[in-house]
């Protein structure tokens, strides 16, 4: 099983967007973060299926996520 980093971003309207840095063009959204997570999973699976259909090389997961603390005085 592969695990891709997903970036979730809230929108001003309250919905959520999601994208996968290691799979350019693989994006999704949802009314909630949870819905966006379900939708991006489906998007990843579909994205990889299409890449394979076209004979493209599916990138291995390489991105990492982390938090960096700053003093935002």
Image (cartoon, helix red, strand yellow):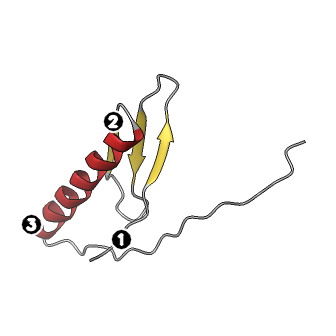
Identity of the residue furthest to the top in this view: 13
Labels 1 and 3: the sequence-earlier one: 1
Q: Which residue is mark 1?
A: 3
Q: Tell whether 41 sits left or right of 52.
A: right
Is the residue marked by circle 2 packed among few (<14), some (14-19), or many (20+) residues within 10 Å?
Answer: some
Camera-nearest residue between 39 and 59: 39
The x, y position of residue 56, in whole percent, is: 20, 71
Q: Secondary structure at mark 2?
A: strand
Camera-nearest label, 2 or 3:
2
Q: Which residue is mark 2?
A: 30
Q: Of marks 2 and 1, which one's residue comes earlier in the chain?
A: 1
Given residues 72 and 61, the one toward you in this image is 72
Disc 3, SS: helix
Between the C-alphas of marks 2 and 1, the distance is 20 Å
Q: Are marks 2 and 3 in contact (CB under 8 Å)?
A: no
Which quadrant of the view contains residue 46? bottom left
Residue at image mark 3: 53
Q: Is residue 19 above or below residue 55?
A: above
């Amino acid at each position: 099983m592969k695990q891709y980093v997903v970036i979730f971003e809230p929108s001003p309207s309250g919905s959520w967007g999601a994208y996968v840095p290691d799979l350019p063009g693989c994006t999704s959204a949802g009314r909630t973060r949870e819905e966006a997570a379900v939708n991006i999973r489906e998007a990843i699976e579909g994205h990889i299926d299409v890449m394979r259909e076209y004979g493209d090389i599916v990138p291995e997961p390489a991105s990492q996520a982390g938090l960096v603390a700053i003093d935002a005085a």
